[in-house]
Amino acid sequence: MNITKDIRYVGVNDHQLDLFEGQFIVPEGMAYNSYVILDEKTAVLDSVDAHFGEEWMNNLKEALAGRTPDYLIVQHMEPDHSANITRFLQEYPDTAVVGSAQTFVMLKNFYGDLPLNKVTVKENDELELGSHVLKFVMAPMVHWPEVMMTYDKTDKVFFSADAFGKFGALDIEEDDWACEARRYYFGIVGKYGAQVTSLLKKAAGLEIETICPLHGPVLHDNLGYYLDLYTKWASYTPEDKGVTIAYASVYGHTAEAAKKLAEMLEEKGIKAAVSDLCRCDIAEAVEDAFRYDRIVLASTTYNTVVFPKMREFIDELTERGYQNRTMGFIENGTWAPMAAKVMKSRFETAKNITMLEPVVTIRSALNEASLDQLRQLADALANA
């Protein structure tokens, strides 16, 4: 695939993978992207996952058409992008390896003492290939410390490492970029909003016509749409109006309350996204929590605290810096309801969180008193 006249795509699609990074379900597979710039000198940008070395090398050799690459640019050291560096250097031992200082520390940690022709670069350093001039943009903690990105000043292409990536192989028809990009962002990069914001400020000073990430499709058109979403995600700004309702239920009574609340909200014309934390993909629930401006957590009291799946979900949110939201709570407890107190305490240090009253307290099963509390909570959410 040609990105521009001189830039070729040489990545691969992975339909063997069940869990990305050992935790994220990827029913539509994954793409590991790699690129080649052909000029007076040639540059290869990143390799691919270990399982696809032969396919990648074949793609690379086809694009090079007999040429020997002058540079291998290593933007990110996660093994899904670096695992074939050793194989590459066996084939092309004289190629210079370009990376940040931290890149070469990690390269040794992962792959031992490789014989390397190292080129260490820093912020705003440039590399001339001929007509193409590459400028390096350091992006530490987006989302590893060694990460850098590469801007081709000639074709105005921004090679963005893991930023602007998404789940899904490239040979699957894409319905909605934002859905899987959002799940990817908040699952993997979401903790590092400040660092992403810093990167976006640097990118604003570049004239970008194409974004080439290490996962997901190459982005050509309507770049403002993607940049706007990333700006919101990085600043923890709600993307849409609506209420995420996430529940953990043992015998179905807490689930019943969560679903009744959703019905009440929808009758008021408010979008309600409901997740059963015991059965759903938690990453999907996390995605919804960051997408919408309001959230309700509904949990059974369990061992005097909260149900384990709710605890896991709250950990996912707080670990990623959850903030700028309005929250409501539903608790259930047959003899000592404690879930709401525990859930609230987990967000005491979160920034700009508004906690609504009333807390809905269910003692075993819904009754008229708790149904009335549920109606009051629906009203409070509608007015928030």
Image (tube, rainbow, N blue to C red):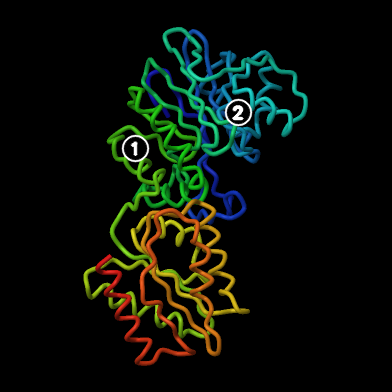
Q: Quadrant of residue 77?
A: top right
Identified by mark 2, the residue type is Met
Local SS, label 2: helix
> What percent of the width, then of the height, locates residue 197?
42, 37
Q: Would residue 150 be found to the left or right of residue 206 on screen? A: right
User: Which label sits in the foreground, 1 or 2?
Assistant: 1
Which residue corresponds to the image point at 52% horizontal and 10% vertical from the top-left?
41
Residue 333, x across and y down, in percent: 52, 85
Side of 250 relative to 270 (left or right)? right
Residue 153's image quarter?
Answer: top left
- Residue 302, above or below 167: below
Quarter of the picture holding the C terminus: bottom left
Image position of 287 with respect to 173: above or below: below
- Where is residue 259 shown, x and y percent of the image? 37, 78
- Mark number displayed over residue 133: none
The one nearer the camera, 66 or 326, is: 326
The quarter of the picture where the N terminus appears is top left
Give the labeled residue for mark 2.
Answer: 57
**For mark 1, does the 10 Å Cα neighbourhood hold few (<14), some (14 to 19), or many (20 or more) residues?**
some
Q: Which residue is mark 1?
A: 227
Query: Sequence order check: which comes first, mark 1 or mark 2?
Result: 2
Helix, strand or loop under label 1: helix
**273 to 76, vertically: above or below:** below
Three-letter code for the amino acid on which mark 1 is drawn: Leu
Dividing the picture into quadrants, the one containing residue 227 is top left
